[in-house]
Amino acid sequence: MATTPTRKTRFSRRVPDHVTDELVNVLTDGKTYDFNELFGLVYENLKLKNAVSGGEEMLRLRSYEKLQNLVGRGLAAKAGKTYRGLESIRQAHSTAVAARAAAAAAAR
């Protein structure tokens, strides 16, 4: 009896992360935003790029998760309910992430 080989697949996100990119774009100006104001700017920018999918509430949850990730990595600061980008926030932009990945691949 022949069995089909099992394929181990891993989900790998290879497309740019538009939500994080927009968060980075908005937070690089040095201003402090509360989450609702920040999300409003990110949402409008994504709508202009036609990169909104899954509905506004789902995007709000994803944005909050990405923002907390930036805070946890030390790229954004949270004071109470306000957020601001730190000097190293550009490291989270997908072009910077892709450049680091390419450099790591070239070093192998």
Image: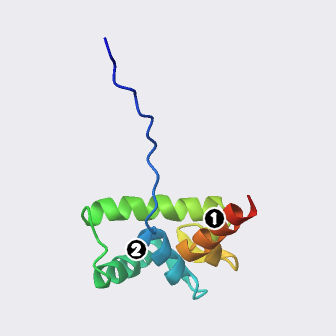
Q: Is residue 54 left or right of residue 25?
A: left
Quadrant holding the N terminus: top left
Q: Residues within 10 Å of mark 2 (few under 14, many from 20)?
A: many
Q: Amino acid at mark 2?
A: Phe
Q: Would you name the residue on which mark 1 appears?
A: 101
Q: Does the CB distance between marks 1 and 2 fall below 8 Å?
A: no
Quadrant holding the C terminus: bottom right
Mark drawn on residue 39: 2
As drawn, the residue found furthest toward the right would be: 107
| 12 in relation to 42, above or below | above
Residue 65: x, y in percent? 47, 58
Tell me which corner region of the image, top left, top right, bottom left or bottom right, holds residue 37. bottom left
Tell me which corner region of the image, top left, top right, bottom left or bottom right, holds residue 9. top left
As drawn, the residue found furthest toward the left would be: 55
As drawn, the residue found furthest toward the bottom would be: 29
Toward the viewer: 8 or 42? 8
Residue at image point 53% right, 68% down: 81
